[in-house]
Amino acid sequence: MKNADARSFLIQFETLALGKTVIHKLHPLTKLMSSFVFIIGVISFKRYDFIRLVPYLFYTVIVTALAEIPYRVLIPKLLIALPFCLFAGVSNLIFDRETALVFLNLRISYGAVSLFTILFKMYLSVSAALLLTATTPLTELSAQLRRLRVPYVFVMVFEMTFRYIGVFLSEIRSKNTAYNLRNGGRKGIRIGHAGSFLGQMLLHGFDRSERVYAAMQLRGYSREEIPIAKQPFRLLDGVVLAVVCALVIVFRFIKIW
């Protein structure tokens, strides 16, 4: 992802989180716990359970539709995680060649089934996480984490990462531009300069992150709960959470097909 694309990604999701759909109006606890239960259910399946994961599409399809999140926004972000999953599962194609099934005279190995399962798990899990951030503002999400007594250090890292990543990517872009202007027209960073370039970025990153944290403190950031209005937990919120948890459990322990 390019630096400009990364910044636009953060801005885009912060804008989407301010929507007024039925999903956006749900209590943050409902969306947070539903996503958590859903992801745990997805990753609990074994490596050959591709078919049993199919019913879990109900969550991503329904939430995407009701929240009015365009697929053109989600798909590019999903593709970012694709290379990591391919590297994790491509070895299965080489070492696990026993035939699992034959489809249209095409022999499909257990390694291929395992690879497809990994990719499908990635799609479902990352989609759930993206939908959570696209329907819940950061302030509400972090406030809910504090109310759940999540350790302060985890909440702080989450908030700092989200707030600082855009600034850090801008710094990388400016440093890279400055290097290219002094590089005699050559593309990329020379191997001999890579160490010093990364070292300077690390030191500059520490300094800039301290300034960002100081600016956040001047604007009222502290260990205490963020002073935002608490949204009442309605009957609809409880019903939605119960339905999602029930479906996840049913699809996990009962074979639909």
Image (cartoon, rainbow, N blue to C red):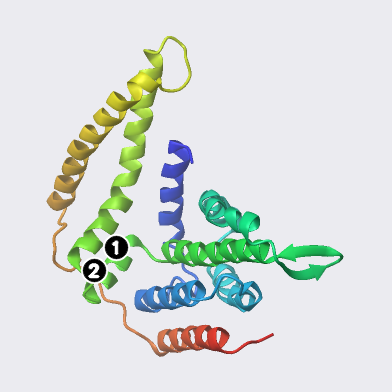
What residue is rendered at 24% in x and 37% in y? Answer: 205
Q: Is residue 161 above or below residue 141?
A: above
What residue is rendered at 36% in x and 12% in y? Answer: 182
Q: Which residue is mark 2?
A: 228
What residue is rendered at 46% in x and 11% in y? Answer: 185
Q: SS at mark 1?
A: helix
Q: SS at mark 2?
A: loop
Measuring from the top left, give residue 16's x and y in whole percent.
46, 58
Question: Horizontal placement of 121 versus 136: left or right?
Answer: right
Count of numbered circles in the view: 2
The quarter of the picture where the C terminus appears is bottom right
Closer-to-camera residue (127/112):
112
* Residue depth check, mark 1 versus mark 2: number of the one nearer the observer: 1
Closer-to-camera residue (79/26):
79
Q: Quadrant of residue 223?
A: bottom left
**Type of amino acid under label 1:** Thr
Q: Which residue is mark 1?
A: 139
Measuring from the top left, give residue 167's x and y in whole percent.
31, 40
Closer-to-camera residue (22/162):
162
Do residues under tags 1 and 2 come within 8 Å of each other at their CB atoms?
Answer: yes
Measuring from the top left, give residue 240's x and y in whole percent.
47, 84
Q: Is residue 196 visible?
A: yes
